[in-house]
């Protein structure tokens, strides 16, 4: 009995010893629980306060106008879209090969009557052109035009090609047109550099039916001006243009005189005609010399008429007549060297094209230009240039145009004048007064 009761007594005594410790543990646990409950209460109070502030701010925002951040962004994007929709982007890349039947010993400048494609037996990057424009097509609107050319044609237009023959001419850059415009009551004012009003053919070779430009384009008229030009219409059919320029083929004025350009034009259905003129110093563009004094003061007058007629959906015709003179030329070469006289030149052109199929066309052009005093083309008396050009064109794709051209040039003069060296021949020092060119051209055009 004694041993039976002993364990119970031991257990009871042990419990009595640990009772205080257990009581203290329970008290500490109760304290921690109380602290946690107090912390939870504080967090709930803060959350309730924050929710109340959010609700108050939401009510405040409801009473005020909401900033149109999204609407403003949409307006900016819309304005950019409208601007880009009015900008016209166009251009082309053109490459050619030229072979001259005279087979000149020196291939440089073998095609003397050409504006471009001057060299014989040469693959050439004619031009890589990019044109950006926005028309000032309504009163109160402004616009601009920026046409940039790269390649051999750019070097020729800028005069670099003649200073560095045979150099890396495809690296040259020329700004063909760069101007801003404003429409004031349907009168468009254009300020800057722009192509001339004169002539039928244009600088961009893909816009002409022929690969090469004719002698009237090359020798009879200016190609571009820098100045101020105004244009508008009298009626739906009749239009006009008038401008003041630095001169003839010069971006910077080289004298104290300004030139005037003007045009009257008429368009009705398939018929178009225009009479254009230039009056002012010609900028010493003759090839037989002119004194500095005359260069600064004497005037040139150029009258140029063009007309076109679309006879049918497949047949079109065009023509040009030119009459010009330059006052008081002081000749330094040729039969009139040492004398001073007025120089005259005049010519005509007739062309046509037949669109045989949707992709294939045939075109022809004939020209005559008489340089009476040997001032515009070559030193001589009664120098006359004749050209006859035939062109086949085929659109390989909607953008890729391939053309093959045969061109015949003939240069005649008074028997006392020597122009035989104008077209050099191969292997000899003498020359010819005629040549025959074969030209292949491929151009990718985009707009």
Image (tube, grey):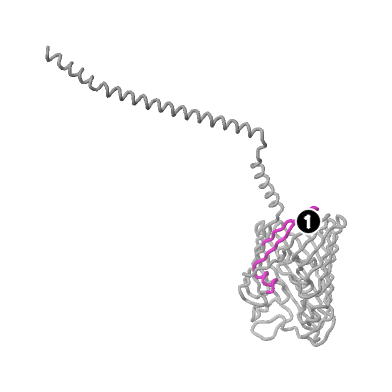
Q: Quadrant of residue 229?
A: bottom right
What stretch of residues is rendered in magenta? 130-159
Which quarter of the rendered picture does the C terminus lie within?
A: bottom right
Disc 1 residue crowd, few under 14, some 14–19, many 20+, Cα 10 Å: few
**In the image, residue 276 lies in the stretch drawn in magenta:** no
Which of 382 and 175 lies nearest the eye of the viewer? 175
Which of 359 and 326 lies nearest the eye of the viewer? 326
Which of 2 and 77 lies nearest the eye of the viewer? 2
Q: Quadrant of residue 270?
A: bottom right
Give coordinates of residue 243: x percent, y percent.
82, 65
Q: Quadrant of residue 147?
A: bottom right
Give coordinates of residue 302: x percent, y percent.
83, 72
Q: Is residue 111 visible?
A: yes
Q: Is residue 266 left or right of residue 127?
A: right
- Residue visible at 75% across and 77% down in the picture: 410
Which of 48 and 122 lies nearest the eye of the viewer? 48
Give coordinates of residue 237: x percent, y percent.
86, 57
Which quarter of the rendered picture does the N terminus lie within?
A: top left
Q: Is residue 442 visible?
A: no
Marker count (numbered): 1
**In the image, is residue 232 above or below residue 368?**
above
**In the image, is residue 257 above or below residue 38?**
below
Give coordinates of residue 418: x percent, y percent.
76, 85
Q: Is residue 309 left or right of residue 408?
A: right
Q: Residue furthest left?
A: 2
Mark 1 — residue?
A: 313
**In the image, is residue 6 above or below residue 131?**
above
**In the image, residue 139 lies in the stretch drawn in magenta:** yes
């Amino acid at each position: 009995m004694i041993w039976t009761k002993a364990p119970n007594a031991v257990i009871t005594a042990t419990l009595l010893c640990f009772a205080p410790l257990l009581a203290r543990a329970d008290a500490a646990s109760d304290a921690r629980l109380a602290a946690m409950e107090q912390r939870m209460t504080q967090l709930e109070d803060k959350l309730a306060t924050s929710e109340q502030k959010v609700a108050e701010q939401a009510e405040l925002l409801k009473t005020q106008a909401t900033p149109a951040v999204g609407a403003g962004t949409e307006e900016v994007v819309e304005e950019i879209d409208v601007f880009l929709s009015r900008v016209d982007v166009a251009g082309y890349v053109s490459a050619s090969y030229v072979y001259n039947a005279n087979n000149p010993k020196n291939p440089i400048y073998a095609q003397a009557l050409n504006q471009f494609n001057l060299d014989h037996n040469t693959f050439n990057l004619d031009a890589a052109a990019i044109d950006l424009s926005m028309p000032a097509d309504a009163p109160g609107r402004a616009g601009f035009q920026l046409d940039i050319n790269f390649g051999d044609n750019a070097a020729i237009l800028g005069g670099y090609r003649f200073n560095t023959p045979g150099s890396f001419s495809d690296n040259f850059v020329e700004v063909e047109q760069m101007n801003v415009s404003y429409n004031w009551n349907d009168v468009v004012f254009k300020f800057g550099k722009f192509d001339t009003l004169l002539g039928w053919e244009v600088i961009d070779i893909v816009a002409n039916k022929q690969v090469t430009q004719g002698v009237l384009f090359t020798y009879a008229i200016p190609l571009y001006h820098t100045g101020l030009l105004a244009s508008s219409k009298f009626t739906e059919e009749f239009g006009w243009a008038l401008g003041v320029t630095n001169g003839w083929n010069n971006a910077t004025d080289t004298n104290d005189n300004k030139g005037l350009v003007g045009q009257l034009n008429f368009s009705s259905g398939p018929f178009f005609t225009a009479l254009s003129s230039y009056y002012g110093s010609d900028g010493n563009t003759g090839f037989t010399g002119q004194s500095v004094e005359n260069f600064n003061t004497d005037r040139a007058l150029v009258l140029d008429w063009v007309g076109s007629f679309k006879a049918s959906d497949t047949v079109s015709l065009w023509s040009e007549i030119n009459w010009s003179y330059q006052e008081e030329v002081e000749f330094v070469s040729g039969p009139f060297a040492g004398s001073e006289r007025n120089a005259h030149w005049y010519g005509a052109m007739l062309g046509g094209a037949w669109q045989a199929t949707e992709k294939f066309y045939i075109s022809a052009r004939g020209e005559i230009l008489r340089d009476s005093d040997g001032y515009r083309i070559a030193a001589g008396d009664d120098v006359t240039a004749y050209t006859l050009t035939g062109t086949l064109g085929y659109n390989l794709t909607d953008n890729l145009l391939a053309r093959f051209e045969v061109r015949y040039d003939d240069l005649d003069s008074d028997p006392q004048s020597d122009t035989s060296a104008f077209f050099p021949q191969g292997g000899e020092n003498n020359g010819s007064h005629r040549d025959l060119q074969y030209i292949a051209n491929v151009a990718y055009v985009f707009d």
